[in-house]
Image: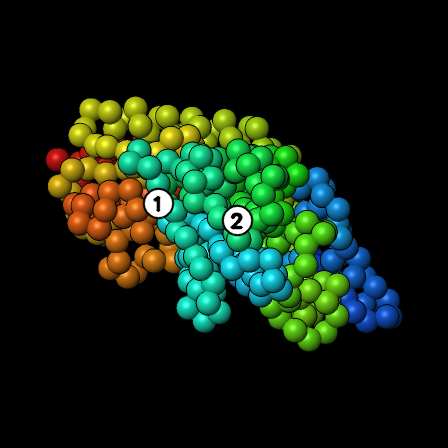
Amino acid sequence: MIYLDNAATTPVIPGVVSAMTESLSATFGNPSSIHSFGRQANQLVRQARDTVAKALDVSNRNIIFTSGASEANNQALIGYALANRDKGNHILTTAIEHPSVLNTVQYLRDRHGFDVTFVNPNPDGQFPAQLIEQNLQPDTILVSMMWANNETGQLLPVAEVGRLLASHPAVFHVDATQVMGKIPVHPHEIGADFLTASAHKFHGPKGIGFLYYHEDLKFDALIHGGEQEEKRRAGTENLHSLVGMTKALEIAIQNMDENYQHVQKLNDSLLSLLSEIDFYKNEFGATMPHVINIAFPHQNHDLLLTKLDLAGFAISTGSACTAGTVEPSHVLEAVYGEDSPKLKENLRISFSELNTIDEINAFAEKLKSLLK
Ligand code: PMP
């Protein structure tokens, strides 16, 4: 089976497995305990925090470990909105965010009375900073924008929006889940006040991620209880997953340039291998090379996906969170409209550095033969 669905999740790499296995057998203490078992565990939590902070070039005081990006997005959005009602009532986001942002701001609208704008892209599918500016209001307290989209790989202009917001009271939340470990991610450089990521997108374990927050921000905790994470996220730390995330991040950063170039090569080679057949790309401006969202006119994607699966190739139509349901992609719907036949044609092929050129050749061959 050849795995080309890395935007959904990535395989855990051997270095991560061994670091986790070692910590599972060697370290079982509760990081909050005073005795040496606790101190040993606490040391691992500190190391994890230092590694994440160093990667982001921020202070280690400003990281909250969470169960992944969904929780981190909920924490940032709900936590900030509820604690800052006095500042304003408007929240702005884009129509193509991950459901963990879209459904969270919908919840804030429906259950807490916030006024929410979901900005639709321009006809070319893009979100220039001016479009965000046009939708800002004096009472906007929060702007949430993903760095790269999980269905198309589209890069959003987070640095430009960050600059724009420097002179506006709204705080800026960036969902960096699809770029963390692949390109340099430094919240200060893009003016992000909150930033989210998840380990399983960079070859770490599932169920662990983090939220960076700017230290001046006031926000409520989502999970109440003990005093872990400076009282911002209660519960005994997910120690072994933290070890795995740390290792995965270290490895990703060490090999970042090389990995990126390799993935770019995979992307280029797939497109050139498919050049003789009729396809179009769902590509809207600058895009991460890790994702190709492609379609073959009049070819139903569900059917093609099943045939590819039977032939040993794992790809998807879009986000894993909506896969398995018959709902069309909200991301493509935002560009093409809900009645477009294009919503039944899209396929998402997503690479990691573990994929090989041979795999891409085999995939292209199979796809071409299925389309004939
Ligand atoms: N945001 C984006 C952009 C994602 O791609 C994902 C994962 N599909 C998430 C958030 C949610 O991450 P997690 O699975 O860690 O909750």
Residue that numbered label 2 is attached to? 138
- Alpha-carbon span between mark 2 and mark 1: 20 Å
Identify the residue shown where x is 38% and y is 58%. 321
Identify the residue shown where x is 60% and y is 39%. 167
Q: Is residue 296 left or right of residue 119?
A: left
Any part of residue 314 in sight: no
Identify the residue shown where x is 58% and y is 43%. 168
Question: Does residue 248 sit above or below 73 in this rendering?
Answer: above
| Place of residue 156 in the rendered image (x, y in percent of width and height, measured from the top left) | 45, 37
| Place of residue 276 in the rendered image (x, y in percent of width and height, measured from the top left) | 20, 24
Question: Does residue 309 sit above or below 34 in this rendering?
Answer: above
Which of the labelled discs sits on residue 120, or is there none? 1
Q: Earlier in the sequence, mark 2 or mark 1?
A: 1
Say which quarter of the image contains residue 239: bottom right
Residue type, mark 1 in image: Asn
Q: Is residue 277 left or right of residue 61?
A: left
Identify the residue shown where x is 72% and y is 63%. 229
| Place of residue 227 in the rendered image (x, y in percent of width and height, measured from the top left) | 75, 70
Q: Name the outermost residue toward the right.
A: 35
Q: Is residue 9 left or right of residue 298?
A: right
Q: Name the outermost residue toward the bottom.
A: 225
